[in-house]
Amino acid sequence: MDKGLLVNRKKIFMRAYSRMYSSIERSFDGDSKEIKNEAVDNIESALHALMDFWERVHDMQEFSQELRSIMKAFRIANDKLKHTKDYDRPASIINSFSFPIMFPMCFDMQYSWGDIKDYLDPNRDSDMKRYPFYEKYLKDNEVRCTFKHVIDLLEKEINL
């Protein structure tokens, strides 16, 4: 794989992450439904960009079990967004923190990953295999923290 292409995909993901982070922060400043919808749209864009990057690097080298497991969680979230017509909001806003706690911890208002159990296809093996990873790494966890965690792992494991 062309290293220049990988660097470009990483930049695209990091810009999407930055837009997501900023729009989430802005959404807490007001009560506009439009701004909150923009934040969720940017969560979706960051998720798609992350998976686009991962699809290009996941077979290039050995990655830690933790990174591979977290990426399975992100992958099923992305798959549900792309292929399930009724599933269009991966995260919802809450005003607290929840358990289990994921580090780094984030407090106050936050967007947390929702449950996708009702959108699983029992005839699709990949759904049934990936859902436990979603439950462990994403479900009910704060969106910015989960993205930051995977960014930290990617930075540690990929030299770009």
Image: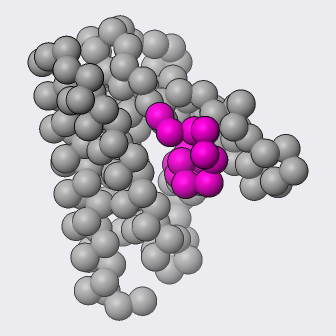
How far from the left and from the top, in percent, is residue 132? 70, 38
Residue 68 lies, with reference to residue 116, above or below; the image says below
Residue 137 lies, with reference to residue 96, above or below; the image says below
In this picture the colour scheme is: one colour
Residue bounds of the magenta highlight: 74-89
Instruction: Look at the image and tell me whether residue 59 can be seen.
Output: yes
Residue 113 lies, with reference to residue 52, above or below; the image says above
How far from the left and from the top, in percent, is residue 81? 54, 48
Instruction: Look at the image and tell me whether residue 73 can be seen.
Output: no
User: Residue placed at 78% from the left, 45% from the top?
Assistant: 121
Residue 37, picture quadrant = top left
User: Residue placed at 52% from the left, 65% from the top?
Assistant: 63
User: Residue placed at 69% from the left, 48% from the top?
Assistant: 130
- Mainly helix, strand or loop, the magenta region? helix
Viewer-side residue, 5 vs 81:
81
View extreme (bottom): residue:
2
View extreme (top): residue:
96
Please check the rendered image and state whether residue 76 is part of the magenta-colored stretch, yes or no.
yes
How far from the left and from the top, in percent, is residue 145? 34, 34
* Quadrant of the snapshot with the C terminus: bottom left
User: Residue placed at 26% from the left, 49% from the top?
Assistant: 17
Viewer-side residue, 66 vs 146:
146
- Horizontal side of 38 relative to 65 (left or right) equals left
Viewer-side residue, 128 vs 150:
128
* Quadrant of the snapshot with the N terminus: bottom left
- Horizontal side of 81 relative to 36 (left or right) equals right
